[in-house]
Structures are given as C-alpha cells and as structure tokens.
Image (tube, coloured by chain):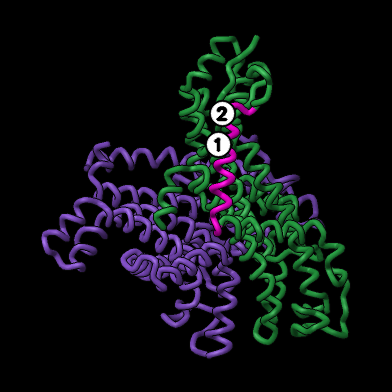
Amino acid sequence: MGEPASPGHRSDTAKPAGGKARGGASEPRYTAWLVIFGRNRMALTGLVLVLLFLTLAIFAPWLAPYDSQAQDLSSTVRPPSLAHPFGTDDVGRDILSRIMLGARTSFLIAVMAVGIGLLAGVSIGLISGYCGGTTDLFVMRIVEVLQTIPTIVLAIAIVSVLQTGIVSVMIAVGVTGIPVYARLTRGTTLGLKEMEYVSAARCLGAKAGRILWRHLLPNALAPIIVQTSLGAGQAILVAAALSFLGLGVQPPTPEWGAMLSRGRTYVTFAPHLVAFPGLAIAALVLGFNLLGDGLRDTIDPRTRRLTEKGI
Amino acid sequence: MVKYLLRRLLLILPTVWIAVTIIFVIFRLVPGDPAELIAGEMAPREVVQAIRAQMGLDQPMHIQYVRYLGGLLRGDLGVSKVYGARVLDQLLLRFPATLELAIAAMLIAFIVGLTAGIISATRYNSLFDYLSMLGAIAGVCVPAFWLGLMLILFFSVGLGWLPSTGRGGLRTLVLPAVTLSAYQMAVIARMTRSSMLEVIQQDYIRTARAKGLTEWAVIYGHALKNAFIPTVTIAGLQFGFLLGGSIVVESVFAWPGLGSLMIDSIRHRDYTMVQGTAVLYTTVCLLINLLVDLVYSALDPRVRYG
C-alpha cells in the first residue's frame, strides 16, 4: 500500500510521474540552503578548519614527519626548530607528529561520542514525542534531570566506573550528549506528528516504526544535523578535559588533552609543550562551532534573519 | 507568587530523587566487583568480603537502593575509605572553596560580559564590537585548562604578579576565577549583545528617544531592563555548568575544592566519595536552577502566571 510522501523526504511508494523529481519539493530547498551556506564566510571558515583537521586525521601516518611514538632521549624538550617545527616533548617525541596523530584520536572520539548520543538521544526523542502521554512525561523527566547534571561531572562519574581508555571516553562523552539530542528530536517530533502526511500515513495503516523511520525522522533531521556539529566540538572539549585529568586516553596514544597534561610539568621553561596542543583543540572546536552556527543560520530562517542584521 | 514558589519547591523533590537514582545506577554499573576494585588486586578474600559487607554490596540491589536513599535522607553519604571520615563532612569541608571560586567567576563573567555586550550593541559594527565578539568566540572554544596554564605562564611565571597555585586570599583567587569565567563571559557577552540589538529596535525605545530621554537613560533605564531577562536566565542556568567546570580549573591551580576531592578520590578508587561528590554537585545545580526560576519569575510576571 502506498503512503503519501512526506515533505523533505523521498518516498519510493509515491513517485511523481516521470520519476525525475524523486526529491520532490525538497530539492530547491537544499539548493537554497547550499547557496545561503556558501555566502556565509564564517561557516565556510568553520568547514575549511574541520576539513583540514579531518585530512590530517585521515592521512596523519603518512603526513607526520616523524613516528609519533618514537622517543629520542638525546633531544628532549627542544624548542621549535626547522627539524621539529613544534619542538619535542619530555622524551624527545616530535610534537607536530603527535598533534597530527592526536587529530585522529580526537575525531575518532568525536564521531563515536556523537554517534552514541545521536543514536540513543534521537531514538528516545522520537519515541517520546510520538507516543506522548505518560511515556513522554516519564522519559523526558529523566532526560531533563540528566541534563541538569553538569556534563563533566557526569562524564567523570561514568569514566570512574569504567576502565580508563578511549572506549570509556567515547561512552562517557556520548552519554552526556543524549539529553540534548533527545529534547531536540522530541520537540521537533511533537510538531511533526500533527502534520497531515503523518495522519495520512497512519490512516493508510502504516505502523508506528515505519512512521517514525520513514516520515518523522527525515523531517526532524535539520536541527539534529546542526546540533551534531556543535556537539562534536563539545565532545572534543570534554574528552580533552578527561584526558587532561588523567581519566581519558592513556599514554602512549597521542591525544591533545593528555599531551597538555603531560606538558604542564614543563610549562615554566618549555611552554611549547602545552601551547600547540591547546591551540589545536581550540582551532578544531572553533571549526565545529562555526560550522554548526553556519548550518543553523542556513536552516533556521529566524536566526538567519538575525544574522543578516548582524545580531 | 507564594503558590508558584510552593509548586516549584515541591517539584524539586522528585527531580532530586531521579538525579540521585541516576547516579546510584551509574555507580552500580561498575564492571566487576566494586569491593575488589577498592581493596586492590592483591587483597585477601576476607578483606574484600569485609568491604562488601561494610558497603552493603552483599545485599540485593533493591535493598542497597533503599538503604542508599534512607542514608541520603539522614545526610549519610557513607564513609570514605581514604579519609576514614564521613563523606558529607569532607564534602562540606571542601564545598566553600568551590563555591567561592564559582561565585567569583560568575561575578567576573557578569561584569565583563554584560559591559562588553552592552558596548558592542550600542557601538554595533565598531572595532570594539568586532574585537569583543572575537573574544567571545574564543571564549567558548579555548579549553579552560589550557587558558589556565597560559595565564600561569604569563602572570605568574612571566610577570610574577600572581601566585599560580593554592588558596589563600584574593590574590590566589584571581587566576582560577578568571579562567573559570572565560566561557560564561563569552556566553553572557553574546547573549547581552543579541538581546540588546533586538530590544533597541522596539517601538518603546523609539518612544523613549522621542520623549527626549538621554541615551544613558534609554539604554540603562529601558533597553537593558528588558534585555536583562534572557541574559539572567542563561547565566543562571549555566551556573551549574560553571560548578562542573571548576573541577578542571581546580586541578590546574591546585585549588582545594570539591573538584580536586573528586579527582583524588577517583585516583584512590574511593567510589563512596566520588558518588557523594556527584550527588552534591547535582543537588546544588538543581537548587541553583530553582533559584534562577524564582528570580526569573520575579523579573518577568508572565512566567509565574503562564
């Protein structure tokens, strides 16, 4: 049985004649978004920064001038030079190479943590918003309380009961992101479930799972995508903080927060040990934040108007 | 107002209950036996069993939960294995230091953020506007622990003006408080600027100007009063996160607060203390949120009648 196509999402059961415009009315919207995004210089700067670090993360083993874990005890805590543009650390490892490899760790954590938050948060938000009633009241109360617990306290609590390491960091940071995605998705779902195409799908006998997956989720995606970018920046900051506190990624894995933590001992006479990893964190978080802000301005007409006015 | 206050106070109880239940569940998810983790790998079996019995871990989960809640109601958060004292006593000992740091940071964030936001809005698109918004963007991206280390490097090591660690008087408070305030400052500055820019386009501002009021009276008497509400809300709600952020800042500046206690306790596998710290942080955050709601309702009557 065919179902009506929901806006912004193609339907394989309700194809327009000729089959050309599978995306239907959504294609002009995406093109308009692309144009608006392309005009936003801050957003483009964010995109370039993120892509730059992504390239570093992917190709780090080939781009890095030295082995990131190779120690050279004859040249420890060296200041920046031509041979080592960012200097060397306390056991003679090249800091530039470690920052490049650290980008890979940070991206891995960000992707996995955001993935955990997305998967759990979006599922909770969709079900809660669609079911409504007692389920919604109960689930959202827990989500609200979870959001009240400071992110870092929750992350520390989770990491403290798991074994320290990269997987624990991903889980801890991921869990802290769940409430944001859940509330966002629930809010959008509440509005969408009253739309006519959802009622039509229900009348045609579509099951709840299908309505959620095929009709509500695709149309709730825009604000979620925006939050994904902002959430990735937040995830990198929290993960770096955990590593800085000695509760995150463990040595010898190169990670920016852990590099800072190790370098703080030498900060008085070798500031480059902490300066460069800190700048790397700030630059990548800045990239994700600018990209997220840009996406929000592109997708949300209200904030776009404010941005155009310079607000 | 009294009815609203009572309703909000009653609502806080189930919220605190859910929060402590979440924390209880997290700490019961410890893979393996928490008693073994506390006792250490080489500990004899008898010692592990004694710890298990002492912590009530030999009881079924629901009994542990009821005992835990009962203890909380009596103010009993357990006994720390490291300090050999009641967890609550240790928390109350350290809490003033964290509160002092958080309040100082909030004050700095408010004064600097609000001023920067107002000037940016009134001198919209000026050099000051660009610079302060650049600073605001940096404020939310720069990790606090890195900023702290850079401030130590500059003001303590380089200039020798301020001490880098410890707690004792105003001089030791400056660097950690400024570090902790950076994020809040950025958020408040951005929020104030955008609220002010929206407010100063309203008709009543035009009317105030048309009446012949001075620019000072228009901005501070009319615009700021209305732009203040969202700023207070955001700043207040962020106070809890500022408390959380203090954990990292305390670690950088060896500040003897709750954050340092929490990290030390994790290193010593003192889970009772870690759990107690998490409960205190969360309860304080919830209470602050309640306070913000009340302030908000006092500032904007539409909230309590809505």
- Checking the image for residue B226, the label placed there is none
- Checking the image for residue A25, the label placed there is 2
Identify the chain of the residue marked 2, using the numbered disc in the image.
A
Between B100 and B129, the residue placed more toward the observer is B129
Between A257 and B199, the residue placed more toward the observer is B199
Q: Which residue, given by chain and number where applicable, does mark 1 sit on? A: A29
User: Chain A, which colour?
Assistant: green
Q: Residues within 10 Å of mark 2 (few under 14, many from 20)?
A: few
Secondary structure predominantly adopted by residues drawn in magenta: helix
Residue at the location (77% across, 61% down)? A56
Identify the chain of the residue marked 1, using the numbered disc in the image.
A
Q: Residue B262's x, y, as percent?
A: 58, 61
Q: Residue A199's x, y, as percent?
A: 50, 16
Residue at the location (58% across, 51% down)? A38
Residue at the location (45% across, 78% down)? B174
Q: Residues within 10 Å of mark 1 (few under 14, many from 20)?
A: few
What element does badge 2 sit on? loop
Image quadrant assignment for residue A58: bottom right
Q: Which residues are magenta?
A: A23-42
Residue B65 lies, with reference to residue A200, above or below; the image says: below
* Left or right of residue B215, residue A278 in this image: right
Chain represented in purple: B
Q: Is residue B264 visible?
A: no
* Quarter of the figure with the N terminus of chain A: top right
Residue at the location (53% across, 58% down)? B86
